[in-house]
Image (tube, rainbow, N blue to C red):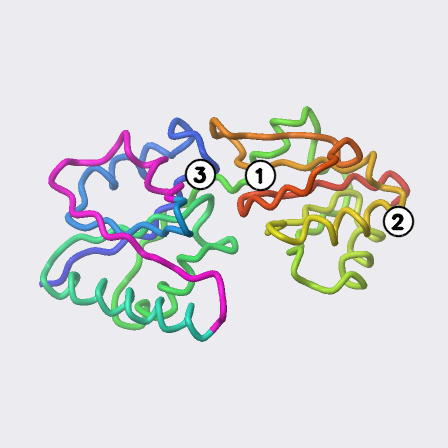
Amino acid sequence: MVGKVYGIGVGPGDPKLLTVKAAEIIGSLDILFYPSFGKINMALNIAKPYLNNRTKKVEMKVPLSPPKDKFKAYCEYSSKIMNYLNEDKDVGILCEGEPLFFGSFINIWYNIRDEFKVEIIPGISSVMSAFSQIDEYMAIGDDSVSIITANVINKVIKEKISSSNTTIIIKIGNKFQKINKLLTSMGLSDHSIFLSNIYSERQFTSKLSKIKNNPTDYFSIIIVKNNNVH
């Protein structure tokens, strides 16, 4: 006998936005793996109201760079997860937002899915939930939408923005100045909204043109509405 393994999306920040299924599974687990980035344990904090005291919690300390260190870390945690599964333990792996949408969980999933069936529990991504916080819609009718990371080159970002009614730039982090400068040069800073820590107590929302400092929060996005696209 082997245990069951779940990739669990915990949503953007509010524990009440977890699905009923996610809450039920979290409360039934033998082992719970959760990602941490520095001192940030966001996924675990979201899941806390649903945890069972008997569940063993395992922190996954994932370096943000360089890639070889990340790869090594994910391989080590994947091995630990498979060991627990072979001991007939039910294992859950938490992921902020939606597990298969830019989730760190994907790295674990690739490593274990050939040997174990992984059940994915969907979650609400920050991208999908952000629009409810800015009184704006993502798309309607034949609108086009682009989602892109702040890490790609400016030329690609500019092309996406120029051809999309709505562009969501994710993984802002320390790329804020780069993106702010680009959007200002395109005359779109008044049509762009910066959001960080969506649906959490630390949520911050502002029109891009009004931000005077240099926010570097890892969990941040910028939404660009380009009304010149038809």
Query: Real-space Cα distance between discs 1 and 3?
Result: 10 Å
Dot 1 or dot 3: first in sequence order is 3
Residue type, label 1: Met
In which quadrant of the rendered image does the C terminus lie? top right
Could you say which quadrant of the image residue 116 lies in? bottom left
For residue 141, side relative to residue 119 (left or right) = right
Q: Earlier in the sequence, mark 3 or mark 2?
A: 3
Residue most toward the front? Answer: 213
| Residue 58 painted magenta | yes
Residue at the spot of label 2: 185
Residue nearest the observer in this picture, 112 or 222: 222
Residue at image location 85% in from the left, 45% down from the top: 184
**Viewer-side residue, 90 vs 51:** 51
* 208 w.r.t. 148: above or below: above
Magenta region, residue range? 41-67
Looking at the image, residue 203 lies above or below residue 22: above
Q: Are marks 1 and 3 in contact (CB under 8 Å)?
A: no
Q: Position of residue 139 (x, y in %)?
A: 72, 38
Q: Which residue does the numbered mark 1 point to in the structure image? A: 128
Give the Cα separation between the discs numbered 2 and 1: 27 Å
Please state which amino acid type lies under the numbered disc 2.
Answer: Ser
Q: Is 106 displayed left or right of 212 in the figure?
A: left
The secondary element bearing badge 1 is classed as helix
> Is residue 102 in sight in this rendering?
yes
Q: Which mark is residue 11?
A: 3
Expressed as whole percent of the image width and height from the top left, the position of residue 141 reads: 76, 37
Residue 140 makes an appearance in the image: no
**Mark 2 falls on what kind of element?**
helix
Quarter assignment of residue 86: bottom left
Could you tell me if the residues under marks 3 and 2 are in contact, i.e. CB atoms within 8 Å?
no
Residue 85 image position (x, y, % from top left): 17, 62
